[in-house]
Image (cartoon, coloured by chain):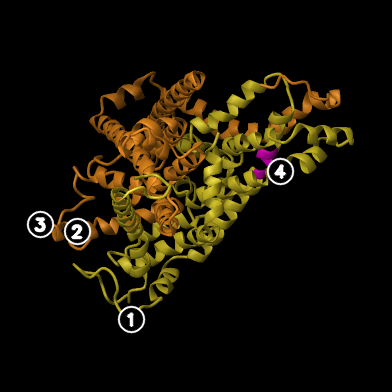
Amino acid sequence: MKTRKRPAPKEREARFLPYLLLLPTLIFVAAFTAWPTILAFYQSFFRQRLNIIKFREPTFIGLGNYVDLFTDDRFLRVLKNTAIFVAVTVPVSVLLAFFLALLVNRKLRAMGVARLAFFYPVMIPLVSAATVWLFFFTPDYGLFNSALRFLGYSGPQNWTGNPSLALMTVMIVVIWKNSGFFMIFYLAGLQSLPVDVFEAAAIDGANSWQSLWKVAFPLLRRTTLFVTTVAFIGAFRDIDHIFVLTQGGPSESSSVLLFYLWHVRFENSDVGQAAAITMILIVVLLVFTISNFVVSERGSKDV
Amino acid sequence: MFSTGPARSWKDWVSRSSLTIVTIVLAVLWAIPLLWLIVASLRPPGNPMGPGDVWFAFPLTLDNFAKAFELAPFGRYFVNTVVIISMVLIVQLVTITLAAFAFARYDFPGKRFLFLFILLQLMIPTAVLLAPNFSTIRQLGLFDTRLAVAIPFFGSAFGMFLLRQAFMNVPRELVDAGVIDGCNWWQLLWNIYIPPSTATYVAFGLASVSFHWNAFLWPLIITNSEQSRPLTAGLARFTQLGEIGARWSLLAAATLIVAAPILIVFLIFQRRFIQSFMHSGIK
């Protein structure tokens, strides 16, 4: 990392001091990141259900928990929901963020207010936001049904209680809440571009959409990579609104991995299976972040 | 049409104006949840909403807020939230400063390994580890305490990483001058490294406060009484109270109680906030 020679601090000090300085951070990372990972790995090979007396004590069952999960229709449904949730919310909120950044990156007074309007959802707790959206999705007089009726569709539709709509309601809230957050990074990216790329592209005779896709978007590649990584990890982590909107239902139709993990561990008291789901989550996240890192390293060599 | 320069032609002007209109429409759509929340919380409690009647109802009143405070100890929840985020922030500031200083200033065997080990926290969000961390907290005897809500976040890979970048940008001449003056390590840290890194501290502080103000899932499972429950978990409990039912104006008031403090702080410091989020994203 560092190759430059520094004026050597006192020998004794330099030998132990760095480790002492790192000790507090290392203790907390070890206790609340590394240890739980190891513990989950270990527990995932045992059957242990705290609410059933004969399964209270852990028994080794090998890959039993994993086999159970992957042969359980409910879990497969949760996996599918998670895949849909990630595949929809990540690209939609990232693209929307790029578009919003372009819109508000203009020197008009109204744009300052617009930035605030797009960014404030980031500041609101996800559970609070969910309460508001629960109202919007209410049958009969919720805003969504009112809007539909205004457009001539007959309501009332029970959004959060409808198995084919519940997951969508959960995704809409996340997109609304996160786009403004990612917008900020694109705004920073746009402002760091050397010249007004749109002016330059216009001189070259490109139209606005061409300059958008062929000039600005590629130049902001690093921003996109960063934002996508943040969005991806967030998509697995931020599930607070599900508790208020749908509780994962009806019949698992809006449950995603972390929510299901909570359900298995704290509703079913199934320690072994919860540990197996934890491991699945960890593997997905590690595979993604590490491959992302490799891609970005390779990319930065190209430049 | 996305250009920031002056319009070049009539056609350009038209396309830009239409973009402005699109922006305003989107901004209004984005703002509706907050606008509704404020308006609904001011409706008189005895005037339930119905089809086409979900916005204003007169006379405007603060009764819903009074009722919300009566039904749940939001004052206590507020204190808990403030205590938790302060604990997290204060400890984090110490741990990230020391760790960032170690990585920025010294070379030592195992440096790269330890750095990657700490970055593991960025790849596996603590939220995902709620089940095994729950067992750890139980074994430590911390269940249902404010410390239990805060302690998993006392070390911060994100903060360490940001601050290390800032420390590495401290001019070498400054550091060398300090060494020549005979500064020991903590004088060096205090007088040379920390002062030029204030912007990073502010950025990290704002990010940490807003993140932990909004945290929900971990507090939900690790608290079980008014003694430790923060606002977010309190709100979730409130929404499940039998008396609430579909009393939306009451629910709106409770929601606003939870969201308003952080929103007000945000509005006051909005430039700082937005800049610091931008700042923290640049690697």
Residue, far bottom: B59
For mark 2, name the chain.
Answer: A
Label the magenta part by its dominant secondary structure: helix
State the image coordinates of residue A82 (x, y, percent, origin top left). Answer: 31, 34
Residue B196: image tag: 4
Residue A147: image tag: 2
Question: What's the CA distance linking mark 2 and mark 4?
Answer: 53 Å
Residue type beneath disc 4: Pro
Q: Left of A155 or right of it: where is B28?
A: right
Q: Residues within 10 Å of mark 3 (few under 14, many from 20)?
A: few
For mark 1, name the chain.
Answer: B
Question: What's the CA distance linking mark 4 and mark 3?
Answer: 61 Å
**Mark 2 and mark 1, same subunit?**
no
- Sooner in the amino-acid sequence: mark 4 or mark 1: 1
Residue type beneath disc 2: Ala
**Mark 4 and mark 1, same subunit?**
yes
On screen, A266 above or below B243? above
The structure residue drawn at horizontal position 30% and vertical position 67%, both measured from the top left corner, is: B247
Question: Chain A is shown in which shade?
Answer: orange
On screen, A113 above or below B253? above
The structure residue drawn at horizontal position 32% and vertical position 34%, both measured from the top left corner, is: A210
State the image coordinates of residue B194 (x, y, percent, origin top left). Answer: 73, 43
Name the residue that disc number 1 marks.
Answer: B59
